Amino acid sequence: MSTTPPTAHITTGPFFPAPFIRPEDADLTRGGQIAGTVVTLTGTVTDARGSPCVCAILEIWQADAAGTSGCWGRTWTDTAGAYRFRTVKPGSTRQDRPPYINLMLHASGLMRPLVTQMFFPGEPLNERDPQLSQVPPARRNLLIAQSEPDGILRFDIAFGGPTETPFFED
Amino acid sequence: MAGGFIPYDERTQPARRISGYPNTQLRTPSQPPVKRVITDVERSGPVFGPESVAAAEADLSVTGPGQPRALGQLIHLTGRVLDERGRPLAGVLMEVWQCNAAGKYIHHNDPSPVPVDPNFRGIGRVMTDAEGRYRLRTIKPAGYAVPEHSFPGTQKNWWRPPHIHFSLFGPAYTSRLITQMFFPGEPLNPLDLILNAIPDESARARLVARFTPELNTDDGALGFVHDFVLRGRSATPSA
């Protein structure tokens, strides 16, 4: 059967419309639609020089706490390059996988979306996760969020520099 | 391969680093990409119900009922969203944005000195029907000079050709697409750093809409057709 390659990606550019970034999309627990342990996920998005990326779009896609259905969220970075989501800790979807959150980034200068995954600190299954195991050992901790007080998880994203986030093939 | 994943073909996707477009240099990772493991989570994707889009959002050329039309050449744009085997994809949410007929975006970061058009909505959303079809009404956007002073290192005299931005949510997380649509016969097309970052000529050609005079309408709209192809679930073999 003949196939056509997917349409080429092209950067969002700098003018992604603000009305498409709805505040409620940054709260995956809105309306009590998913139950579970609530976490605040926050961090910064920086470029290869460590400068904050403003209006970088983050989309998350994760399992709910039961591990049965997917939950989507979106926000963008502020003038300090910071973002914040409110969500729940996902359940495991496979016995060999710890909880994780898919992250996709769009920004001016990203000709194609960048994808990665965020893992939770202190999860025993992190040690033998099939996806995390694909990351060079010295860089694996860059995909594990840092626990802060009050249920806050910090996950900084760097497009380059010494703490460049491991991004996945697309 | 268990948990396998077929990455995009580099020839039909744009280079990540573009000389003269500084943000592509500063925001492109230097480390090789990590091999990807796909599970049922990534084979599914967010579902937006038809009720999440209002009919009025398909018309970017007016800000509301009874309001005057935006300035510029009115166009009627339609087409289908398909998977790689040509099968229609229904229920795809499409987010659309573009500059006005003078080259100005409705955005707080647009430094362009050209005028705002108060009658231009500038953004829209539509959802594909059971045949994978969408319909939009808008005005043809202008080409515009990329503001060199805002982005040091930008190539001098780089103009973006007229283009419309599209963001599509397909059937899977791995189907997500953000792209741009160009217009046929534009002298800026062969000069654009972005369009020409795609190595494959036919992949570039597939980003250019087809002028389709049979779709012209009496109220002054020219007809264009443009299709999109999303990576389907089929591109991600089962784990």
Image: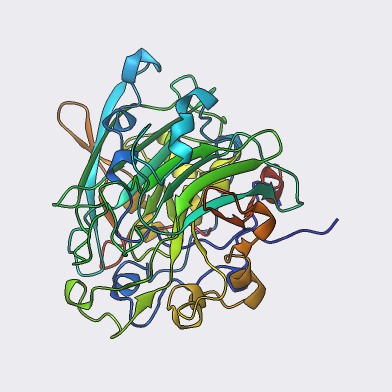
Residue B235 visible in this rendered orientation of the protein: yes
In the rendered image, residue B147, in percent from the top left (x then y), is placed at 23, 73
Position of A154 relative to B106 (above/below): above
- The image's colouring method is rainbow
Q: Quadrant of residue A8?
A: bottom right
Q: Residue drawn at (37%, 17%), measured in percent from left and top?
A: A36
Q: Residue drawn at (65%, 57%), measured in percent from left and top?
A: B6
Q: Quadrant of residue B130?
A: top right
In the rendered image, residue A157, in percent from the top left (x then y), is placed at 29, 53
Q: Residue furthest bottom?
A: B156
Q: Residue drawn at (51%, 82%), measured in percent from left and top?
A: B190
Label total for image: 0
Residue A141 visible in this rendered orientation of the protein: no
Q: Nearer the viewer, residue B197 or B78?
A: B78
Q: Nearer the viewer, residue B141 or A52?
A: B141
In the rendered image, residue B157, in percent from the top left (x then y), is placed at 30, 84
Q: Quadrant of residue B102?
A: bottom left
Q: Quadrant of the N terminus of chain A?
A: bottom right
Q: Residue furthest front?
A: B218
| Left or right of residue A82, residue A89 in this image | right
